[in-house]
Image (cartoon, grey):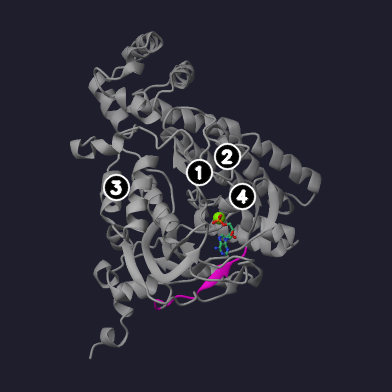
Amino acid sequence: MSSQDQNPLAGQGWNFDNSYTRLPESLFVRQKPVAVKKPELALLNRELAASLGLDADSLDGPEGAAVFAGNNLPAGADPIAQAYAGHQFGHFTMLGDGRAILLGEHVTARGERFDIQLKGSGQTPFSRRGDGRAALGPMLREYIISEAMHALGIPTTRSLAVATTGEPVHRETTQAGAILTRVASSHIRVGTFEYLAARNKTDDLRILAEYTMRRHYPELAEAKNPFLELLRAVMEGQARLVTSWLHVGFIHGVMNTDNMALCGESIDYGPCAFMDAYDPATVFSSIDRDGRYAYGNQPSIAQWNLTRLAETLLPLLHEREEQATVLAQETLEEFPEMFRRHWIEGMRAKLGLFTAEDEDASLARELLKLMQEDGADYTLTLRGLTEETPDGSFFRDTGFMRWRERWEARLARQSETPEESRILMRAHNPAVIPRNRRVEEALEAATLKNDLAPLKRLLDALSTPFEDRPEHARYRDPAPLDADYRTFCGT
Ligand code: AMP
Ligand code: MG
């Protein structure tokens, strides 16, 4: 008998090293996932499994289902629930993993470290009044959107698997229970720092800040004021992340400080959605009644959240509080400029510009203004620019014709050919995004008819978003579900 027969988990390729469990105990509670009745694998991300060095074949069956449902712990896992707090819609609350378990950190052969987290894995000491569970629809939704974001080149947590539990969960309706296996560079949130600051645990906070730096920004250790540089690096990451959202029309929907990761990845896909017609006031989330997290508010909310992070770091920035505040404020003031830099860089690529001119920002803004006035579809309009004779009423509008002359004159002032511009633009203006209608359609088939085929076809189309293939035509259709489409947290 080989050792693999004795331990079916040994052959799956896990390589855990759980550095978070070596941090102060204020940051987590040891907690195992609560076993479920009937684990079944709904989705396995074989490509991601392979890139992590896991054996997709041995995970693609009952043994994988048992791991991804939390019934069987992979060798080397040391499961914990992480403590954190957060400003939710502006209000401070103590939170923590109420329905998630961090199995541990899987280290790949290349030495990259990834959190492996089960979401929907049962109650923890942080569950408050929640059942610790998740419904199939929202977990499949996170899988679709996170994988779409990854294919779009946007930093994001990934989805390795969805397992069903064989147990019902009770929300507005009763749904099938499911668990998502999430892969993240880490789950350290702005809210993790807020948690320690609220409990006046300055020593632990310093340890967490040093740990975050070692894990994500090791080059900063030598800096004169490393913690100020940590703040700046996180700001830079968020400027990059949120501009990349704006560039594809993504609205996160719940940019609470507990949903902002210091590693700069998009995290916690709840009521998020992609905008159809360009309008900065667009909000989809049913719980965001005041539009706090509207498309166009995302940059200022990012800055607001970073300010909350900076406040927690004050004791580490300078021994005198006044000095620390000045340093933090001066650094935070750099954010709008960082954001503008990332924004215009992306917009130049979207418009086929290789060189930089001062008027580029106004050229980009003018196009957005025309799109807004016309109610033009954001994604289709930008992709349309890559065609020699774009189709559609927007492109026949006199406002657009005038803009086009200005744009063509600008293109003529660079040495690259029109075809080179089109290649650049096709790599930055996706043809396929997760349109609300197609996402809902796929989720409905999966949850109501137990049919995953539409969802798998959608995932396939979303895996090559910059390719305009005839067989993906239906995924480009911009027709919104209806004018007041709403998304739900599903918690
Ligand atoms: P989220 O909206 O998923 O970012 O979650 C916000 C907070 O609520 C986190 O602390 C979650 O762990 C917690 N939470 C959400 N849903 C549940 C649930 N069904 N049971 C327990 N805790 C939950
Ligand atoms: Mg969250």
Q: Check disc 3 and report the residue beneath it.
A: 458
* Nearer-N-terminus badge (2/1): 1
Q: Are marks 3 and 1 in contact (CB under 8 Å)?
A: no
Q: Position of residue 432 (x, y in %)?
A: 31, 38
Residue density around tag 1, few if under 14, some if 14–19, many if 20 or more, within 10 Å: many
Q: Check disc 2 and report the residue beneath it.
A: 293
Please give the name of the residue rendered at 52% of the width and 60% of the height, measured from the top-left corner: 171
Q: Position of residue 51 (x, y in %)?
A: 30, 59
Q: Amino acid at mark 4?
A: Thr
Q: Amino acid at mark 3?
A: Leu
Q: Is residue 367 left or right of residue 48?
A: right
Secondary structure under tag 2 reads loop
Secondary structure under tag 4 reads helix
* Circle on res. 257: 4
Q: Is residue 453 above or below residue 433?
A: below
Instruction: Classify mark 3 as within 8 Å of ligand 1 or not, answering yes or no.
Output: no
Q: Check disc 1 and report the residue beneath it.
A: 252
* Nearer-N-terminus badge (3/1): 1
Question: What is the magenta range?
Answer: 72-83
Camera-near label (1 vs 4) is: 1
Which quadrant does ligand 2 occupy? bottom right
Q: Amino acid at mark 2?
A: Tyr
